[in-house]
Image (cartoon, helix red, strand yellow):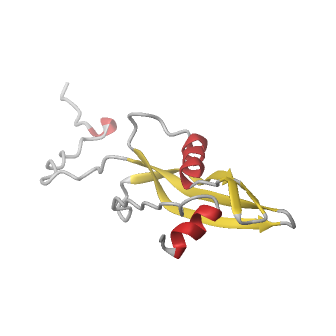
Amino acid sequence: MLPMTSSFGSLLGGTPPTELHEQTGVNLSQANFVVVKTNVVGRSKGFSLLGLITIVPATVSKATGRMYAAAQMRLGEPQTIANVIIERSSSYWILFGIPKVEARADVVEFRPLVTPPEHPPPPKPPRDPPGDKPARPG
C-alpha cells in the first residue's frame, strides 16, 4: 500500500517539486561593489487542468535562467546577483489554472578595494613662486 501523499501526488501530475536553496555569503557592506542593474526579472508560466492536474509546470530554474539572460552578465567578470526574491503565484479559471514563478534580483560588480599606503610619503617642500627670486647684483 502506498502512502496517501504518493498516490494523491501522482493524480495531481507527479511528485511534488524539489526545492534546493544554496547560499553563498557576500559582504556588501564595504565600498567594494557597484550596482550594475536593479530589479532584473525572469518569469516562468505553466498550465494545469482544473487547477489540479499539471500539464506544463512553472519552474524556478526556467525563471532564474531567464533572469540571468535579462541580466546580461559577462563571463569572466566579477559579477553576481544579490537581493534575490522568488515569488510563486497562480491564476485560477473555471477549467484551468496558470501557475507562475517570478525571480528578481539586482546585479552587482565587485571592484578592488583601494587601501591607503601604510606610510605616506613625506610632503614636498614648497616651491618659490617665479616672481619672488632674489635679484642678482649687476
User: At x 53% / y 75%, what residue is drawn?
Assistant: 4
| Left or right: 40 as drawn, with respect to 131 | right
Residue 133 against residue 106 in the figure, above or below: above
Which residue is more in the foreground, 27 or 31?
27
Q: Position of residue 74 (x, y in %)?
A: 47, 35
| Left or right: 129 as drawn, with respect to 55 | left
User: At x 18% / y 45%, what residue is drawn?
Assistant: 124
Q: Residue furthest top?
A: 138
Which residue is more in the foreground, 103 or 31?
103
Q: Position of residue 33 (x, y in %)?
A: 41, 53
User: At x 33% / y 37%, what residue is drawn?
Assistant: 131
Q: Position of residue 136 (x, y in %)?
A: 19, 29
Q: Position of residue 37 (x, y in %)?
A: 57, 50
| Left or right: 21 as drawn, with respect to 84 | left
> Could you tell me how many numbered marks the image carries?
0
| Left or right: 80 as drawn, with respect to 70 | left
Residue 66 against residue 4 in the figure, above or below: above
Which residue is more in the foreground, 14 or 99?
14
Q: Residue furthest front?
A: 1
Residue 76 against residue 46 in the figure, above or below: above
Query: In what quadrant of the picture does the C terminus appear?
Result: top left
Q: Residue furthest bottom?
A: 4
